[in-house]
Image (tube, rainbow, N blue to C red):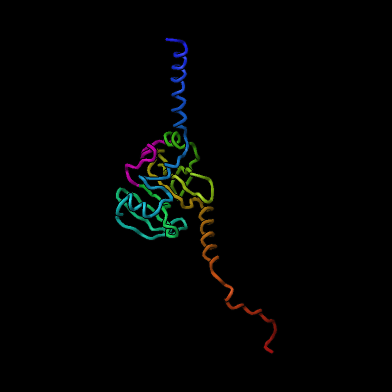
Amino acid sequence: MPKSIFFLLFAFLAFLPLTAYAAEAPGVRDEDFSYRGVALGDTEEKLLSVYGEPLFDTDTIKDGGALRVYTFRGGIDVGIARKTGLVVDFDVRSEDFSVRDVKKGATVYWIQKKFGKVPSTNLDGQTVYIYRRAKTKEDRASLVLVIDPETRVLTSLRLTALPLTDEERHAAITEEETEATGDIDTSKLPKAEEPKLGGLF
């Protein structure tokens, strides 16, 4: 075998593990913010066309937002923002859930190998790892992985574009109040008279 061909073959074989490692580098991807063909930000129409008829739906307030929540077979609740008609929340409790090969029972090591390292935090009494798609006020999309604090394995997951922290929830409520009052025309309301000081006469 000529030396040039041997060198090219050796270089190609040496390069393969590097490309495989680069492809599997830890971190979140856009696909991590969708579940079974529907993504955060998709329309209500797309959700129903992909998931089919829900078992039932309820109207509720969750994390400061008015939602219509559809419950589907297999332990999946999907929240639609009443204001926009867009998918903003997936609460997945099914036994066979999977996001990019991360399934129920996955260890913290496996989670971090897929999505990277973030500190664990307490969210509504649960130990969770929160992975953000972007760190902006406009894009709150988050992958929330719920961990059993004793066994340190994955028990359930949530995909959400709703505010998660108290700070985010307060900001969202303030935005809603500002928008609600910002459209009211108060120019024709009667003006309060100046109070006059003095006695009866």
**Which quadrant holds residue 45?**
bottom left
Q: Is residue 30 left or right of residue 58?
A: right
Q: In the current view of this chain or complex, which residue is farthest to the bottom?
A: 201
Q: Is residue 190 left or right of residue 200?
A: left
Q: Is residue 11 above or below residue 60?
A: above
Kindly identify the residue that appears in the image at 36 percent across and 39 percent down: 103
Residue 163, given in percent of the width and then of the height, sits at 49, 52
Residue 21, given in percent of the width and then of the height, sits at 45, 28
Q: Is residue 141 left or right of residue 54?
A: right
Residue 66, given in percent of the width and then of the height, sits at 43, 60
Figure quadrant of the N terminus:
top left
Residue 137, given in percent of the width and then of the height, sits at 53, 51
Please provide the residue range marked out in magenta.
93-108
- In-front residue for pair 34/45: 45
Figure quadrant of the C terminus:
bottom right
Kindly identify the residue that appears in the image at 51 percent across and 61 percent down: 176
Q: Is residue 136 above or below residue 29?
A: below
Kindly identify the residue that appears in the image at 43 percent across and 28 percent down: 20
